[in-house]
Amino acid sequence: MSFKTIILLSLTVVLIWSCSEENEVAPQLELTGKWKNVLTQNAGRTEILLDFQADSSFVMTLSHYGLQPNTAPDDLNASLEYPGTLTVTEDRIEFNINEYTYTDYYFETGPETFENRTVFYDNCTYVISGDTLILSYTSYPADAPIAAEQRFLRTE
């Protein structure tokens, strides 16, 4: 076999091998974009917006509407912004948040920035199905830890 034939065969094998592998999207790129969840309560609603960036930074914004007495359902009463970074490995997400900013529109105070002492979405795994992001995590109500889930729809 000539040297050219060996090189040509080797190149063909490499091309076939490289084309047959699945090109997986990096987890943080798969999450990139805005995701929204709306929680309704008796007197209003809370919207949670997750805005994930390709550089693993994010902002989680909680907006509370119509929760204060004598406010319309669409009146923004308060908002909290939690900037941070994500650690994403396979199907797991760790939300790293050091501070948050609180603005109270009802009492007209803020914005004020505070140190964050809350763990969000502890032991969190995620699945993306179409335009739905499903976060499964451990929640800590008053009596004992429980498994919890939230669903977010992609908005951008």
Image: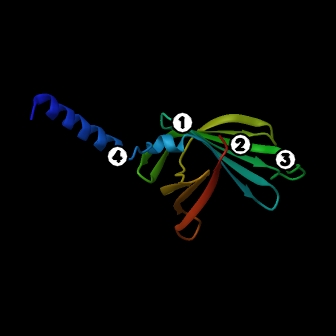
Is 15 left, or right, of 55 in this rendering?
Answer: left
Looking at numbered disc 1 in the image, what kind of residue is underneath it? Gln
For label 2, the residue is: 79
Screen quadrant of the C terminus: top right
- Which residue is the site of mark 3? 74
- Residue 154 visible here: yes
Residue name at image x 53 percent, y 67 percent: 147
Which quarter of the rendered picture does the N terminus lie within? top left
- The mark nearer the N terminus, 3 or 4, is 4
Q: Comparing marks 2 and 1, which lies closer to the viewer?
A: 1
Q: Can residue 97 be seen in this snapshot?
A: no
Give neighbour class at mark 1: few <14, some 14-19, many 20+ (Cα, 10 Å). Answer: some
Amino acid type of the residue tagged 4 in the rendering: Ser
Q: Are the residues tagged 4 and 1 within 8 Å (C-beta)? A: no
SS for tag 2?
strand
Say what amino acid the circle numbered 2 marks.
Answer: Ser
Spatial separation of the CA atoms under disc 4 and disc 1: 30 Å
- Is label 1 in a helix, a strand or a loop? loop
At horizontal 21% and vertical 33% (from top left) the residue drawn is 8
Q: Where is residue 54 in the image (x, y as percent from the top left)?
A: 50, 35
Badge 3 density bin: few <14, some 14–19, many ≥20, Cα 10 Å: few
Foreground tag (3 vs 1): 1
Q: Which of marks 2 and 3 is in front?
A: 3
Circle nearer the N terminus (3, 1): 1
Distance from disc 3 to disc 4, alpha carbons, whole Å, reads 52 Å
Residue position for label 4: 20
Q: Which of marks 2 and 1 is nearer the N terminus?
A: 1
Specify the label residue 53 is tagged with. Answer: 1
Residue type pointed to by label 3 = Asp
Callouts 2 and 3 close, C-beta under 8 Å: no
